[in-house]
Amino acid sequence: MSESELPAEEEVTGIPYWRLRGVSDRLSILQVITPSRYSGAEQVVVFLSAALEQAGHQVVVATKANERLEDELAKRGVEVHTPGIAGKTNLAAPGRIARLAREIDADIIHTHLSTASLWGSVAARRMDIPALAHVHALNRRWWYGMADAIVTPSQGVRQHLIGQGVDPACIHAIYNGIPAERFASLPPPQQVREELGLPEGVTVVGVVAHLSPKKGHKYLLEAVAKLSGRHPELHCLIVGSGPLAARLPRLAEQLRIAERTYFLGYREDAVAIMQLCDIVALPSVAKEGLGLCLIEAAFVGVPTVGSQAPGIDEAIVDGETGLLVPPGDATALAEGMDRLLADSELRRRLGESGRQRAEKLFTVEAQAAATAALYRQMTVAGKRSGY
């Protein structure tokens, strides 16, 4: 039913009745994303959309053609459209998004990544419905300026945007959630160990991250080398791909730890590999959106070591679920790892505490509930907060 079809007397407390749809149990949500690959933001769209559907909402996803993303959404029963919305010079994109929003009678448009946030916000203005922009990492503010509000995966990203002059009242931090399916039917650790050719009885530190300078792999390799005397059985698993894929193995050779370092490339079964580890590390030298690999490690009960940096310091509670060390400091990283390797009871305690915290804060159900509450708040408000 359109706004013009509703009688004036159905306005309540100054809010038009059509805006009050947002307080009902069921919302109609248009998710918009224009991905270049299938990675973190795309997975958030898949998992969040499926969780919102399971909670009783209608969710439709508009995206540019991306076979993996489309398949993952279809597997979960989420409706997906590819209406030709790619590109920041695509002036037809807002009309196409608005047309789809009109067809599903959308209450809100939730955008992800820069291009989708630009055109999705324009479409929302045409429809006079709210637009929520999801900033997944440490991005610049420019592409999100027409949204009614912003959601971030951590306080670290929120503070990054505030530092650029974005009104704090417009930014809402909601932790990304990891679905239980990621941890269902994991193969036995011994099976994975045999597949990787890991010797029996060795200790293992692992990292799951893009092979780029900001992730700090260099410092992890240097820390492993520093520990060679005290822990000659320590092996290192490096999961990920990226521009340092050729350089890091050469560094391992120079540090004389190549025979104990495994470069595994990008792996769909990263969680299965993490469950082998005695420690999972993320030695980033820059801020992180959140550090999801640390949270995945927590879900499988593995203690973590990470840099004392925004984002990471929300994934790890220092001394309770893992250890935080100064970024870019191989000696401090080695000392933190040594502390854990020398104390099996400490590893067990931190791992169990991390699991309990992850199950409380980082489920996709918790993310969906908080996001739906924000949708309702924005829909009822029926006006732009602006920034």
Image (cartoon, rainbow, N blue to C red):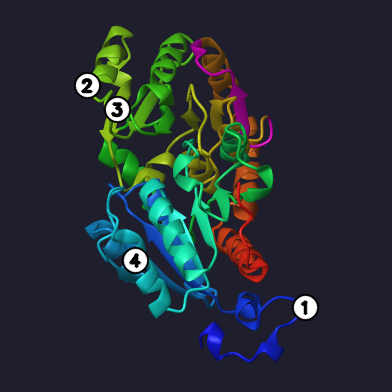
Q: Secondary structure at mark 3?
A: strand
Front of the two marks 4 and 2: 4
Residue shown at the point (33%, 44%) measured from the top left: 192
Q: Name the residue that disc number 3 marks.
A: 262
Q: Name the residue that disc number 1 marks.
A: 13
Q: Name the residue that disc number 2 marks.
A: 246
Q: Name the residue that disc number 4 marks.
A: 95
Say which amino acid is labelled 1. Answer: Thr
Determine if the magenta segment contains residue 194: no
Say which amino acid is labelled 4. Answer: Gly
Q: Which image quadrant for residue 276?
A: top left
Q: Which residues are magenta?
A: 319-330
The first of marks 2 and 1 along the sequence is 1
Q: Secondary structure at mark 1?
A: loop
The first of marks 4 and 1 along the sequence is 1
Say which amino acid is labelled 2. Answer: Ala
Q: Residues within 10 Å of mark 4 (few under 14, many from 20)?
A: some
The first of marks 4 and 2 along the sequence is 4
Front of the two marks 4 and 3: 4
